[in-house]
Image (cartoon, helix red, strand yellow):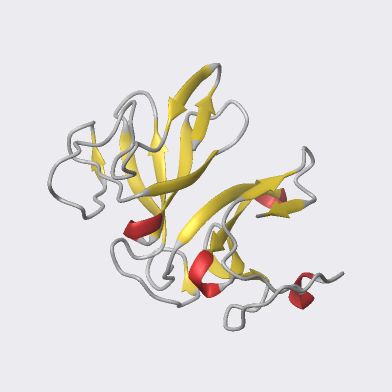
Amino acid sequence: AICCLGAAAAPVQSYRGSWVWHRWGDDSSSSASADGVGTSTARFNNPMGCVQRAAGGNSLFVADQNGYAIRQATVGGTDAVSTYAGLLNTPGTADGARLTAAKFTKPMGVVNVAGGNLVVTDQTRHCLRKISSTSVDPYAGDCTTPGYTNGVLIAQCRFTEPYGLASDATQDALFVT
């Protein structure tokens, strides 16, 4: 995956997927994800999808697949990485408070949507989940039943292991792979 901050490309996944190149990742023997300030303490464990926080912003949201969380990486100043949603290194299926209750099983893709929210594919839950400033909630698909069903309403859709996400320029339409 490649994310861009301004005009400079920042590759976000290494060949083996265990660290984030450019600013973070010590590529050490530790496989656990870790928050931190500076380039030597923060670690990702198989980063997948990424999106710039907002046009012109200086941070990325990264789906840390095996860290079971959505991470925020800020470029410039302190180069900090923090957990934005989910309980870091704790897999699970809980919805709820963004930092204290929500858990992911395999977050893969992440996009911005209208209202300043994010939508994430949680691959092994077979659904899309919305992250607001306070909570993580089901967004599209049935988080307990996989399937291949199109629907006019997002609750009617079914996915089987959704992977990637993209949105249109107005953030009104999502494209799921």
94 to the left or right of 68: right
Where on the picture, by quarter, is residue 17?
Answer: top left
41 to the left or right of 3: left
Q: Write the residue at 39% across / 28% down.
A: 75
Q: Which of 98/120 is in front?
A: 120
Where on the picture, by quarter, is residue 69?
Answer: bottom left
Q: Write the residue at 43% across / 68% down.
A: 104
Provide residue 112's location: percent of width, then percent of height. 63, 46
Q: Write the residue at 55% across / 20% down.
A: 6
In the rendered view, tell whether residue 57 sits above or below residue 34: above
166 to the left or right of 85: right
Check the picture and name the quadrant holding the C terminus: bottom right
Specify the farthest residue to the right.
Answer: 152
Specify the farthest residue to the left.
Answer: 29
Q: Which of 151/42 is in front?
A: 151
Provide residue 176's location: percent of width, then percent of height. 68, 55
